[in-house]
Amino acid sequence: MNGVRLAIAGASGRMGRALLEAAAADPGVRLTAALDMPGAAGVGRDAGEFGLAGRGLAVTSDVAAALALSDTLIDFTRPAGTLAYLAACRAARKSMVVGTTGFEPEQLDALREGAKEVPIVFAPNFSIGVNVSLRLVELASRALGADYDVEVFEMHHRLKVDAPSGTALKLGEVAAGARGTTLEQDGVFARHGVTGERKAGAIGFSVARGGDIIGDHTVYFAGTGERIEITHRSQSRATYAQGALRAAKWLAGKPAGLYDMADVLGLRA
């Protein structure tokens, strides 16, 4: 059986299950390992309990053994877990697809350092639609300029632990970069009380959490007498999983480096 050999981390979690289901439907990949962190409830269970592709494959915490059977590790867990998997991939010289969010600056530095040794696709959102939206935001921000106020709104399920979402931050970064600025300079992440007038050039963020919403993002460009709204709504985690599998297949034969979905989809300007 041909195809990219995949190890899927966090196999018993929400995204792990979505990845297992997507792998079962994709003839271009082959599931060779299902992983969870030591002590996780899924370790030792048949991965088929979590997704069709895992039938007959036991979930393991032995990363080295999993990577020995695999070409690429897909990881959508938490920053600490991702860095542990990164160390194992560097040792085994295996590629990674990373969809984890909520990294601290020093953790991102570790990811960049690891990409000097192994190829990594790292993106805050693997939905193909979201990544096309990022390109649209870039074009709009560059064309409209500072005369249009930018606001980023996002809403996710009640269990999400980081805010704003990695996707929202990326949308803001793209809008800022197209104007020649940064979120560090112009991002506004909290408003309460008497805030005064909106600062020219500010890029504002609004966050909502509730229910089981998978992910809604809207970027508003508000000008005088008109506004443009670029919106993406996720209805299923399958979209993220399908994008991650596409990234894993794209990585085959790539040299070490830090890539993103713009590279995978040929959207690089």
Image (cartoon, rainbow, N blue to C red):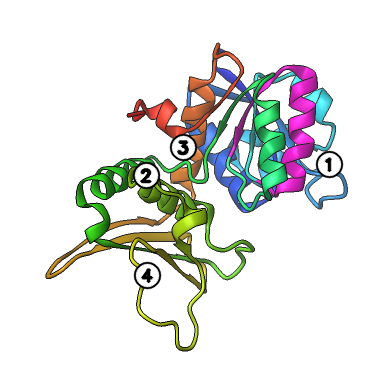
SS of the residue under disc 1: loop
Give residue 115's quadrant in the image: top right
Tell me the kind of residue under disc 3: Gln
- Rounded to the nearest whole Å, what is the CA distance between mark 3 and mark 1? 26 Å
Mark number, residue 1:
none
From the viewer's perspective, tell me whether residue 185 is left or right of residue 148.
right
Front residue of 143 and 197: 197
Q: Which residue is mark 4?
A: 199
* Element under disc 3: helix
The label nearer to you, 4 versus 1, is 4
The residue that disc 2 covers is 180
Looking at the rendered image, the quarter that the C terminus falls into is top left
The answer to whether 203 appears left or right of 41 in the picture is left
Contact check, label 4 and label 3, Cβ < 8 Å: no
Where does the image place residue 164, in percent across and percent down from the top left?
53, 62
Q: Which residue is mark 1?
A: 44
Q: Residue 165's x, y, as percent? A: 52, 58
Q: Which residue is mark 3?
A: 242
95 in the magenta segment: yes
Name the amino acid, label 4. Lys
Q: Position of residue 149 (x, y in %)?
A: 29, 64
Q: Residues within 10 Å of mark 3 (few under 14, many from 20)?
A: many
Name the one closer to the observer, 149 or 228: 149
Mark closer to the chain start, 4 or 1: 1
**Secondary element type, mark 4:** loop
Amino acid type, mark 1: Gly
Please tell me whether mark 2 sits on a helix, a strand or a loop. Answer: loop
